[in-house]
Amino acid sequence: MRWLPVLYVAVLLALEPITPVQWPVSFVLIALPLVAAFAHGPVVVAGVTVFAVVFEGVLAGTPCCAGRPVDHVWERYYVAAYVCTALVGTLGTILAAHRTRRERILADVRFVADMAQRVLLRPVPHRIGDLVLESFYLSAAAEARIGGDLFEAVPTVHGVRLLIGDVRGKGLQAVETAATLLGAFREAAHDEPDLPALVGRVETSMARHAERLPGSGSEVAERFTTAVLAEIRTDGRIVRVVNCGHPPPLLIRRGEARELDSGRSAPPLNLGVLVREPYHVDTYEFLPGDQFLLYTDGVTETRDPSGAFYPLLERIGSWGPLSPRELLERLHDDLVVYSHNRLHDDTAALTVSLLPDGPKGPDEEAGRASVRPGA
């Protein structure tokens, strides 16, 4: 784009000698300042405007190019072109100044959004004991940085507690709700000894948050979040799962994936108070080399141009065994290609893999697991 004005002038110079005298191409130089305004600042556009006016006079007074004698440089048609070029150049300079100012504002907003995302969705630890973790967040909007999809992994004395969720709605309210959920989970994960108690603690925090927001009773009831909370203890090869209305996680073993869905999902967070039933914990075997994949519905609801949903199980089963990083990179790229780069919803995924040498023995405390920030 920055070289577009030069290309524009080069094309005019090539066409000018071969065009009829009564239709001189040099008049098209009137648009040159607007062409420059697409990629350059106001100072450059003002300079291009002066250049265009002078160059129009040169072409008008050059017999070999315009077919007119020098004394017709000030012919009224050319004078009108000079005036029009100057006016267009003035508008182009104003346009370039406005575009430059908006680009600076956008850069500042994106910087603030990046910082907000680092606080809201901080990188999960890449390694916790014998567990390897990877995650990604893919926004549906090109300029978006934060939204209602969330994930977290917290190493505690009770094991590694995992969370993935999807807040209903969009905008600042969804971001605020996501921040509330993450804050409650990060604090309660260290205090609550079992998974149902952890979910209940988070449920209480979400209900209080929903009540503080303005709106009618029906609107408060619609402020819910689907989520999966899981726990991988370091003293045994099992993973415990409580599903709160969220897409079921996947267990990938030797390249084959299956859904961990017992059919006993709890209501989404902030709706559990309506049911008042104890949370059901599903327990699954988790062997060395296995991967535990958590994801939001942005993955399975991704559509191709024909409207077909993304076949997650089929795709993962066709890729064969992959490391956690390779799996998420492949999933990320495949979603973009499948949707033809037209995602309609935010997407998040978190995967946990148990290293082949297995978990540490019961005599090694979970609290002593080393934590290294992810790349």
Image: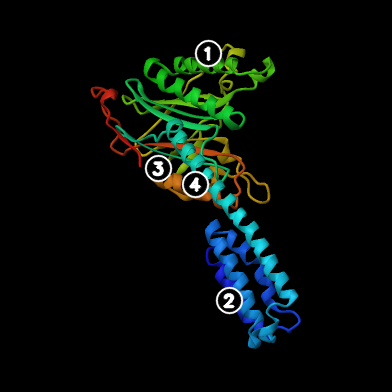
Query: In the image, residue 74 lies at what x, y percent?
Result: 70, 77
Neighbourhood count class around disc 1 (C-alpha, 10 Å): few under 14, some 14–19, many 20 upward? few
Q: Earlier in the sequence, mark 4 or mark 3?
A: 3
Task: Name the residue beneath numbered marker 2.
Answer: 10
Task: Name the residue beneath numbered marker 1.
Answer: 278
Q: Amino acid at mark 2?
A: Ala
Please identify, in this view, whether the residue under mark 4 or under mark 2 is nearer the observer.
2
Please state if 293 lies on the left or on the right of 140 as rendered. left
Q: Earlier in the sequence, mark 1 or mark 2?
A: 2
CA separation in Å, label 1 and label 2 = 75 Å
**Front position in the image: 298 or 147:** 147
CA separation in Å, label 4 and label 1 = 36 Å
Please identify, in this view, whether the residue under mark 1 or under mark 2 is nearer the observer.
2
SS at mark 1? loop
SS at mark 4? helix
Query: In the image, residue 204 lies at what x, y percent?
Result: 52, 14
SS at mark 2? helix
CA separation in Å, label 4 and label 2 = 43 Å
Q: Amino acid at mark 1?
A: Pro
Q: Residue at left 60%, top 73%?
A: 54
Callout 4–callout 2 Cβ contact below 8 Å: no
Please state if 100 lies on the left or on the right of 88 as rendered. left
Task: Name the residue beneath numbered marker 4.
Answer: 332
Please identify, in this view, whether the residue under mark 4 or under mark 1 is nearer the observer.
4
The answer to whether 162 is drawn above or below residue 64 in the figure is: above
Which mark is drawn over residue 324? 3
**Front position in the image: 202 or 83:** 83
Q: Residue at left 51%, top 16%?
A: 205
